[in-house]
Amino acid sequence: GGGGGVNVMGQARHDLMKHHINARHILTVKGTENLPKEPCIVVGNHTHMHGPICAELHFPGKRRTWCAHQMMYLKEVPQYAFQDFWSGRPQWTHGFYRLLSYLIAPISSCVFNNAFTIPVFRDNRLIKTFKQTISSLQDGENVIVFPECYEPYNHIVYQFQDRFTNVAKLYYKRTGKAVSFVPLYIAPELKKMYLGKPIAYDPNEDMDTQRQKICDYLMDAITEIAVNLPPH
């Protein structure tokens, strides 16, 4: 798991990487007044590797970030990293980025295993992801999710994979509490993260209808934050 018992060498390497990365990702967080008092699910734009790194380094308070499980396993990092971050780059650069994806593998597995993460599985192990998420919320931790897929929603954000919303239904069953989803826009060029107004899960509404409603609200809220900022 991510963030559990970490050995001294692993922690030292993580601290070293954190210091190195921090220099490039110094962000301030705006809109923290939009965070509910109860633990919530924060939903952001991925911005390649910026999203998870910024969440780990700069998000205020207790939190866990959903992390693709491939980024936590040494042998699985290269293929996933190339596909997810760089496969859209010009063909002539692919050799370089394939090499880079191998070079980052030990760094990625070290950092994300020693960070405050929840591994995300996209097969029948997804229930493990949900169980860890519910436990984190019950422990008072906010959970940060980057659910974009490869299909554009508009010029700012990509369509959201919507299964993350199912956590709300499970959490309500477990605790009787309606969790809120908070939109997050990360603007690395402006060195800022912006939190928007939340939308709460409604236990009285059909989940199939609500799933799309929550995603649409979050994608539109992130877009609105972005278009109202200075050019970037």
Image (tube, rainbow, N blue to C red):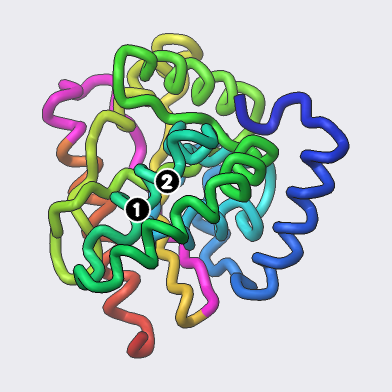
Q: Nearer the viewer, residue 77 or 152?
A: 77
Instruction: Estimate the x, y position of residue 7 in percent, counting from the top left.
Output: 82, 31
Q: Which residue of the protein is positioned furthest toward the right in this rendering?
A: 8
Instruction: Estimate the x, y position of residue 143 in percent, counting from the top left.
Output: 52, 38
Q: Does residue 27 show up?
A: no
Callout 2 touching callout 1 (CB < 8 Å): yes
Task: Rate crowding at label 1 as few (under 14), some (14 to 19) or many (20 or more) other CA atoms within 10 Å.
Answer: some
Q: Is residue 87 above or below residue 72?
A: below
Q: What residue range appears in magenta?
A: 191-211
Residue 137 is covered by the magenta coloring: no
| Residue at which label 2 appears | 78
Q: Which residue of the protein is positioned furthest toward the bottom in this rendering?
A: 231
Q: Does residue 33 show up?
A: yes
Q: Residue at point 65% right, 57% down?
A: 57
Identified by mark 1, the residue type is: Phe
Q: Is residue 21 above or below residue 179?
A: below
Callout 2: SS: helix
Between the C-alphas of marks 2 and 1, the distance is 6 Å
Q: What label does residue 82 carry, if any?
A: 1
Task: Count up the numbered dots.
Answer: 2
Find residue 226 and report its image quarter.
bottom left
Quadrant location, the N terminus: top right
Find residue 138 and report its image quarter.
top right
Q: Residue at point 38% right, 67% down?
A: 96
Identified by mark 2, the residue type is: Pro
Instruction: Estimate the x, y position of residue 121 in percent, counting from the top left.
Output: 38, 25
